[in-house]
Image: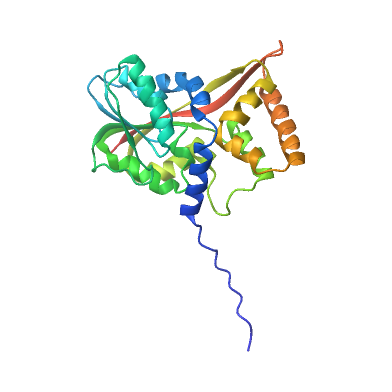
């Protein structure tokens, strides 16, 4: 009797992956980094051609960059994230500006809103990190009205941030079978995710420029406040921490275009506007 060799691929425990990611994004203080990205939210809102009075949902909003940009344009904004501390930081920013934003905890893969509730659904460097990419894309499309718009800002695979995650993956390999977040930064994957639901898609390649006192200063900020980097260092022994730090500094210098000792590092991303069927 011959032995039977199983070739089936073990099921991915997406719930466990999501829990691990939640812990990572809850670590440090992403808001410190998030506020530097404000220009991305402003640019996306212009690309979406927001009109005053439109109902806008910001998914995986972090501390509210795109949220605030939409609210400044007199939109009716609901800002969501699954990290409550980030919502609190966004709420404080909105309050300081006197902007009437509704902040609500929500999972990007299970949005608590009826079908077709919003004129615009958007996410800047947020929804791309969900473990179940197809479900998150389906939820964004479901919440958007027919004829409405979906707006995204996603790091590309070869961008500064894309390379940061690749480098971390060499020290701490990601869960087997989980698709790379950087796939959201490719036109092919976006068409796979939204193809059946899109009427048109417009994509612009843009750069967000990371500006810090030096590469070492950038690393200090990211190691302290940017959850995934903060958690990566915490999971390594002293020797590997030192090696990772050296590799990250070298990576930052590779992207650095400054010659005065400061860091001026372009980070490519896709600015995406999808018109929903």
Most foreground residue, 17 or 230 = 230
Q: Residue furthest bottom?
A: 1
Most foreground residue, 190 or 75 = 75
Instruction: Specify the color scheme.
Output: rainbow
Q: Position of residue 186 (x, y in %)?
A: 51, 37
Residue 9 is drawn in which quadrant?
A: bottom right
Q: Position of residue 143 (x, y in %)?
A: 28, 40
For the C terminus, the image quarter is top left
Residue 148 is drawn in which quadrant?
A: top left
Can residue 45 be seen in the rendering of this structure?
no
Q: Residue furthest right?
A: 239
**Number of numbered discs visible in the structure rendering:** 0
In this picture, is 91 found above or below 143?
Answer: above
For the N terminus, the image quarter is bottom right
Q: Tell me if 78 is positioned left or right of 269 in this view.
A: left
Residue at x 75%, y 35% (from the top left corner): 242
Most foreground residue, 28 or 204 = 28
Q: Tell me if 109 is positioned left or right of 267 in this view.
A: left
Q: Position of residue 201 (x, y in %)?
A: 38, 33
Residue 55 is drawn in which quadrant?
A: top left
Q: Position of residue 43 (x, y in %)?
A: 42, 20
Residue at x 60%, y 29% (from the top left corner): 224
Can residue 257 be seen in the rendering of this structure?
yes
Q: Tell me if 239 is positioned left or right of 184 in this view.
A: right
């Amino acid at each position: 009797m011959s032995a039977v060799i199983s070739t089936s691929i073990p099921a991915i425990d997406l719930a466990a992956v999501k829990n691990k990611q939640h812990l990572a994004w809850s670590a440090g203080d992403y808001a410190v980094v998030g506020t530097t990205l404000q220009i991305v939210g402003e640019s996306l809102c212009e690309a979406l051609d927001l009109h005053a009075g439109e109902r806008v949902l910001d998914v995986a909003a972090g501390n509210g960059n795109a949220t605030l940009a939409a609210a400044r344009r007199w939109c009716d904004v609901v800002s969501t994230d699954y990290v409550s501390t980030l919502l609190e930081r966004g709420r404080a920013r909105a309050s300081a500006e006197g902007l009437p934003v509704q902040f609500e905890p929500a999972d990007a893969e299970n949005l608590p809103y009826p079908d077709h509730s919003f004129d615009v659904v958007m996410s800047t460097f947020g929804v791309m990190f969900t473990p179940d990419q197809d479900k998150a894309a389906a939820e964004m499309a479901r919440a958007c009205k027919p004829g409405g718009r979906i707006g995204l800002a996603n790091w590309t695979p070869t961008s500064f941030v894309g390379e940061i995650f690749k480098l971390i993956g060499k020290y701490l390999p990601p869960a087997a079978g989980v698709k790379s977040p950087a796939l959201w930064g490719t036109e092919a994957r976006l068409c796979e995710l939204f193809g059946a639901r899109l009427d048109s898609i417009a994509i612009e390649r843009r750069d967000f420029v990371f500006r810090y006192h030096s590469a070492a200063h950038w690393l200090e900020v990211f190691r302290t406040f940017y959850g995934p980097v903060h958690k990566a260092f915490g999971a390594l022994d002293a020797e590997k921490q030192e090696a990772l730090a050296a590799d990250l500094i070298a990576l930052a210098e590779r992207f650095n275009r400054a010659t005065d000792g400061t860091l001026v590092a372009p980070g490519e991303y896709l600015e995406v506007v999808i018109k929903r069927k």
